[in-house]
Image (spheres, rainbow, N blue to C red):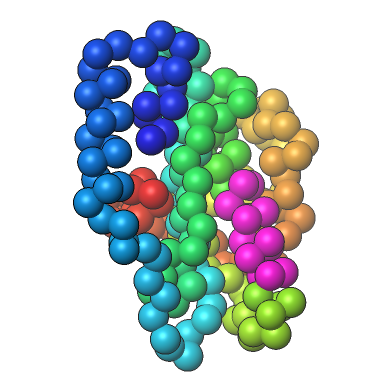
Amino acid sequence: MGKLSHCLDCPTQAHYTATLCVLKYLKQSPATGLFFATSSNVSPTGFSDADWAVCLDTRRSVTGYCFYLGSSLISWKSKKQPTVARSSSEAEYHTLTLAVCEAQWISFILANLHLPVTKPIPLYCDSQSALYIAAIPVFHERTKHIEVDCHVVRERESHFWFIEVASDFHQGSSC
């Protein structure tokens, strides 16, 4: 659906055919839904990833993250970033920022439901440079252009456990 939504301005026959495939899938699987397994583990785990300069027209990157509660997927996002990132590190750091904000919201919801949340929340990221920017609160020549709102990661670092993960293992890429 995300790919189809990019073509609303000038759809072609190929887009119409793809839309019919989506509708056929929905019609054939009305009982399919999200499955929440019963387990004692209600701690959220997150994955974040960015696809740098993927849009050939605007050169904007795509943000992607997903969160699990135990083994159940509870939150995900894949969206084109609002600004052009000057480096893959900036794109990954922007994605990490959005993932941190989502993790905070999930923690808030779980706390309001009186469910214990283990802190720090594990947040997997495949960008060593983005994790370095988050961990070391020093402005470098290469990071001074990163917008101030992205530094929410630094501010809330003690609430999260940032874990570097190999790109081929990364689940955020498939969200």
Q: Is residue 175 left or right of residue 112?
A: left
Residue lying at 31% horizontally and 57% vertically, measured from the top left: 30
**Splitting the image into 4 quarters, where does residue 32 fall?**
bottom left
Magenta stretch mostly in which secondary structure? helix
Out of 33 and 51, give the one closest to the viewer. Answer: 33
Out of 63 and 24, give the one closest to the viewer. Answer: 24
Query: How many labels were placed on the picture?
Result: 0
In the displayed structure, 42 sits above or below 27; it is below
In the displayed structure, 6 sits above or below 170; it is above
Residue lying at 35% horizontally and 55% vertically, measured from the top left: 171
Residue 118, image x, y percentages = 60, 81
Residue 135, image x, y percentages = 63, 55
Residue 4, image x, y percentages = 37, 27
Is residue 159 something that shows in the picture? no
Q: Is residue 114 left or right of residue 93?
A: right
Boundaries of the magenta span: 97-109
Is residue 4 something that shows in the picture? yes
Out of 144 and 98, give the one closest to the viewer. Answer: 98
Q: Quadrant of the N terminus?
A: top left
Residue 49 in the magenta stretch? The answer is: no
Residue lying at 22% horizontally and 24% vertically, measured from the top left: 17
Residue lying at 51% horizontally and 58% vertically, measured from the top left: 75
Residue 8, image x, y percentages = 45, 18
